[in-house]
Image (cartoon, grey):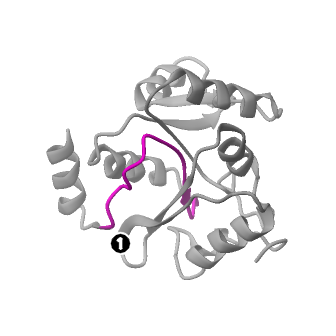
Amino acid sequence: MRIISTNILRILGWKTSGNFPLLTKSVIIFAPHTSYWDGFYGKLFLMQFGINYKFLSKKEFFKFPLNIFFKLFGSIPVSKNKEFINDVTELFKNHSELHIVLSPEGQLAKTDHWKKGFYYMAKSANVPIVVGFIDYKKKEMGFKGVLQDTADMRKTITEICDMYKDVKGKYPQDFALDKRYC
């Protein structure tokens, strides 16, 4: 699957940068998230690394027949309540290798207030945050860095904002950094 996904991305004109860090567990955030195509390209990108990962998706997507697609895609349904943070923490405890993938914006629509669930998941499970990106202007995706120390939420999210400041989504007008921290 690694070779197939690499070749599909090349055929589609995408470049990749950075290697996946040597981690067995992490919360991987990908931004900007302005199109449903982000998930397709992100899946192809992550397949190159042979890691065990799951995407978090809105529970509303898990109605027949879409639920079949999303389960095959590797998605886990989440609701808007905060209990899913505990559920993800339990998943980390029950797996020797697991990477949870989500968007810090938490939605496709433009928002200047990111959801902080990714931060609380990483902190609760004591795993690092891997900052991934998808840049449609450059047709490039990759990793910007790894945040091991998540003790200070403001510092962590400010660092993430700095990493995303020059990245362009498919619909750049629909992406904004979190104005509370950036």
The foreground one among 78 and 151 is 151
Residue receiving disc 1:
139
Stretch in magenta: 17-34
Based on the picture, tell me whether residue 32 belongs to the magenta stretch.
Answer: yes
Figure quadrant of the C terminus? bottom right
The image shows residue 104, relative to residue 159, as above or below, that is above
Q: Position of residue 84 (x, y in %)?
A: 73, 30
Which sits in the foreground, 136 or 16?
16
Quarter of the N terminus within the rendering: top left
Vertical relation: 103 (above or below) 147 = above
Left or right placement of residue 17 versus residue 143 in this view: left
- Work out whether 54 lies above or below 118: above
Residue drawn where x is 54% and y is 82% of the image: 166
**Front-most of residues 4 and 162:** 162
Label 1 CA crowd tier, 10 Å (few <14, some 14–19, many 20+): some
Q: Position of residue 28 (x, y in %)?
A: 53, 50
Q: Indicate the position of residue 136 as horizontal and vertical percent values.
A: 43, 71
For image coordinates 76% across by 52% down, the residue present is 116
